[in-house]
Amino acid sequence: MACEKLLIYPFDYEMLPALDRILDEEQYIVSGIVSFGGWGYIGKDAGNIIYGAAKGLVVSNDFYTELAKCDTVLFCKSDNEIIDFISILEKMRESLRAKKNIICFYKLDQKIQNELEETAHNEGVYFRICISEYEPSVNYELKRLIKLSDFHASVIFVMGISENTNKYGVELVLHRNFQKAGYHSVLVGSKTYGSFFGDYDIPNFMYDNSVMDYEKPLLFNKFVKEIEKKENPDVIIIGVPGGIMPIDKRNTNRFGMMAYQISCALPADVTILCNHFNFFDDNYFNYINPLMKYRFGKEIDCMFVNNSVIDLINEDVQGEVSFIHVFPEKVTQEVKRIAKKNVFSDIDKMYQYVLNLLEQYGTNTVI
């Protein structure tokens, strides 16, 4: 069966890990990538927008020219607040009228969703929303009375000091490498569109204010246990959304509450902490290691250093967190200078370190 030609819109750096996976799995041929002019990506190779490896795909700002070349449009969900959803919605309608399939990472109002699905049916194309709605199919009240379950699979936590530390990229590379090595790996990812790749997402009850905070760890424990019973995996990778601590008084990362609840839910055989680029010293490690141990009950087994940096000047002026990126070579130099065996800028090397840890621990008879 011929691969569908895929247009990705609106593209930003947070979609880079997903783009890598799309290219790696070869289910689609990426025919075009479109972004907004104000984001600074236009005319650049998609991989070079944050100084990464080239993909051979140049970012355009001409949606309609690229639309004519594709079979399917992937409408991405970006956290950039300048996006006008009315404009996005109109492009969805025009794409369907042009007889293009749509894959959507947005959660839509039911009335809008019904309208788009009807248009797709009339035009002979498909409209697919890829946001996992998976919830445990057991009685919540019964769950709250049951003790925490143990796990046979090896469990890996991927946590971040804050957002935009490339947690999702780390999750995907670990997941891919375990699969290529012949292990049955399951990913509960930190993004909301895992169902597009056949993965699991953090369940809705973790964001539901009607569920008590102290009940969420137990419910999440049962959620993951049901996945283990269904999949019988060797490895379960848990991508923890958000950060583990506030950035400052205005930008709190929700005080790391999600990270705390998930860390209470199940044990981790390996815990990875993703970091922004910095010039690290012993004070940082002397602070962060005890914080992880005593707040979350997790020792840091290894650390990943991303090339993102919090833009302190913009934060001071605008009151909002934004990020800039440094050259990967600078990150590599800093990791070499640190000279710690468990600090990495290369995810593939970190995977091998994690695999060796699991072999030493003997937590899973397959590994």
Image (spheres, rainbow, N blue to C red):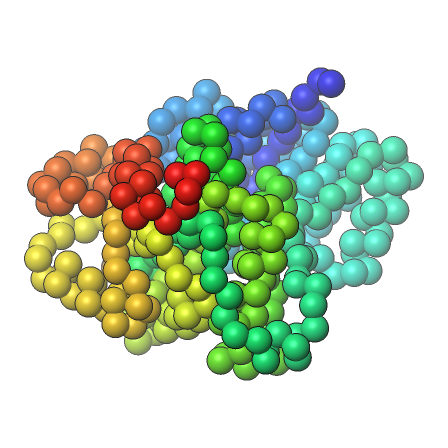
* Nearer to us in this view, 123 or 134: 134
Q: In this view, does 300 lie to the left or right of 367?
A: left
Where is residue 138 drawn, in percent x and y?
69, 68
Judge whether residue 155 can be spotted in this image: yes
Within the image, what quadrant is residue 50 found in? top left
Q: Is residue 267 left or right of residue 113?
A: left
> On screen, 121 above or below 160?
above
Q: In this view, does 107 lie to the left or right of 347?
A: right
Total numbered circles? 0
Q: Residue at x 76, y 32 (%)?
A: 100
* Nearer to us in this view, 268 or 275: 268
Q: Residue at x 25, y 72 (%)?
A: 294
Q: Is residue 70 left or right of residue 317?
A: right
User: If the image is split into quadrants, where does the C terminus sit?
Assistant: top left
Where is residue 366 drawn, in percent x and y?
43, 38
> On screen, 286 above or below 349?
below
> On screen, 118 above or below 51?
below
Judge whether residue 262 can be spotted in this image: no
> On screen, 255 above or below 77?
below
Where is residue 26 drawn, in percent x and y?
58, 24
Looking at the image, the residue that sits furthest to the top is 2
Where is residue 40 drawn, in percent x and y?
41, 39
User: If the image is split into quadrants, where does the N terminus sit?
Assistant: top right
Looking at the image, the residue that sits furthest to the right is 122
Q: Which residue is drawn at 37% across and 73% down?
A: 255
* Nearer to us in this view, 287 or 230: 230
Q: Which residue is drawn at 72% across and 39% down?
A: 102
